[in-house]
């Protein structure tokens, strides 16, 4: 792809995200979402592979439908209340439509079907953008309208997402699909707490983005996209594979690592709201996800295939990538001891 074109698309992504997260008017928020959608489509389709073209068409159709629903819900609300302000969403039908639209944009169950397919058809870098940056504007809209959302619908979708994200990831061999189902599962955790503590949802999203970025950047460095090639990737960069194992366990939410912090806080908040049964269900469902994270960690580091290829160890790689990877890996593994300081910000 032409470097100038790529620069324009990345700048448009930043512009669209900034417009949506800083707007008060529904039309401006919708405009930002549309700019984002139109900017990411060429990045998905840039490899010119049939699967990439298919992924970009699926993404366009789903996002266009979701954007139309956002516009429809805001118009209904404006018709009945005379308000175009995002925080003044009060009409029940408009709230229901917006919840559906945002769930479609994020990939919450039952509107999740497009997400694994689109991620599988994208490159690792574009998949990283789709999993993190493209989810920020819809999460922001959920944050701004959290006081008026339908709690029963959101809780149902959240529990279904946590369960199905773990269940569907069990039998996958393609790493991008596994990470797509991991994303759906994490979105369930974010959606379940948005009504009770919206700031905690944002914290969960930030930490999830950090850990996912670490995993994607590592996979991009060692050039691995499926489990069979992951088994022999340890011969290239042994230390990087060791840190990948820790990042995956952090994404699973195991205690001494960063990923445990948001899950711990969400379970604590649900218990405070006297939703102990909900907290128990979503915690048990996260064990499904833990299984495939452990499988990935096992393949990345612990498995030594009997006939591994003779490969020269790469001790020197791209220095700019090294710095970014070192920072993101350190943060995604060791932020738990800093949790008292993080908690002062929410």
Image: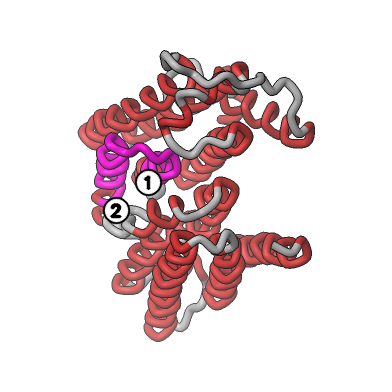
Residue bearing mark 1: 184
Which one is nearer the viewer's eye here, 33 or 243? 243
276 in relation to 188, above or below:
above
Residue at left offset 28%, top offset 31%: 288
> Badge 2: few (under 14), some or many (20 or more) residues near its Cα, within 10 Å?
many
Residue at left offset 61%, top offset 21%: 311
Residue at left offset 33%, top offset 64%: 100
Residue at left offset 20%, top offset 33%: 277
Callout count: 2
Which one is nearer the viewer's eye here, 274 or 49? 49
Visible in this render: residue 178?
yes
Q: Earlier in the sequence, mark 2 or mark 1?
A: 2
Residue bearing mark 2: 109
Residue 200 lies in the magenta-colored region: no
Q: In the rendering, at what x and y percent does residue 189 appear?
A: 37, 40
Q: In the rendering, at what x and y percent does residue 157 appear?
A: 28, 51
Spatial distance from mark 2 to mark 1, Cα to Cα?
8 Å
324 in relation to 195, above or below:
above
Q: Residue furthest bottom?
A: 79
The way the protein has been coloured in the rendering is secondary structure
**Horizontal arrangement in the rendering, residue 38 relative to residue 262 (left or right):** right
User: Which segment is the magenta one?
Assistant: 157-184
Q: Quadrant of residue 237?
A: top right
Which quarter of the rendering shows the C terminus? top right
């Amino acid at each position: 792809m032409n470097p100038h074109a790529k620069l324009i698309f990345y700048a448009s992504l930043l512009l669209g995200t900034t417009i949506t997260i800083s707007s008060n008017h529904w039309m401006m928020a919708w405009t930002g979402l549309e700019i984002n959608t139109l900017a990411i489509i060429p990045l998905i389709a840039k490899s010119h592979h049939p699967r990439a073209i298919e992924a970009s068409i699926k993404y366009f159709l789903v996002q266009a439908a979701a954007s139309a629903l956002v516009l429809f819900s805001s118009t209904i609300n404006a018709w009945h209340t005379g308000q175009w302000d995002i925080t003044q969403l009060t009409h029940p039908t408009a709230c229901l439509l917006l919840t559906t639209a945002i769930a479609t944009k994020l990939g919450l169950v039952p509107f999740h079907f497009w997400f694994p397919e689109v991620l599988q058809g994208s490159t690792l870098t574009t998949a990283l953008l789709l999993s993190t940056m493209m989810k920020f504007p819809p999460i922001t809209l959920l944050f701004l309208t959290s006081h008026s959302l339908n709690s029963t619908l959101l809780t149902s979708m959240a529990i279904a997402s946590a369960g199905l994200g773990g269940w569907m990831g069990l039998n996958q061999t393609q790493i991008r699909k596994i990470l797509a189902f991991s994303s759906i599962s994490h979105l369930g955790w974010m959606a379940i707490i948005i009504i009770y503590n919206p700031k905690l949802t944002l914290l969960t999203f930030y930490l999830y983005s950090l850990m996912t970025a670490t995993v994607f950047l590592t996979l991009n460095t060692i050039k691995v996209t499926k489990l069979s090639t992951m088994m022999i990737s340890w011969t290239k960069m042994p230390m990087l594979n060791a840190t990948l194992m820790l990042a995956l366990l952090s994404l699973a939410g195991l205690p001494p690592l960063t990923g445990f912090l948001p899950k711990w806080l969400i379970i604590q908040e649900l218990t405070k709201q006297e939703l102990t049964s909900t907290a128990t269900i979503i915690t048990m469902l996260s064990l499904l996800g833990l299984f495939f994270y452990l499988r990935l960690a096992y393949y990345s580091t612990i498995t030594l295939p009997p006939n591994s290829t003779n490969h020269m160890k790469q001790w020197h790689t791209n220095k700019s990538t090294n710095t970014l990877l070192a920072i993101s890996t350190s943060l995604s593994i060791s932020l738990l001891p800093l949790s008292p300081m993080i908690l002062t910000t929410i």
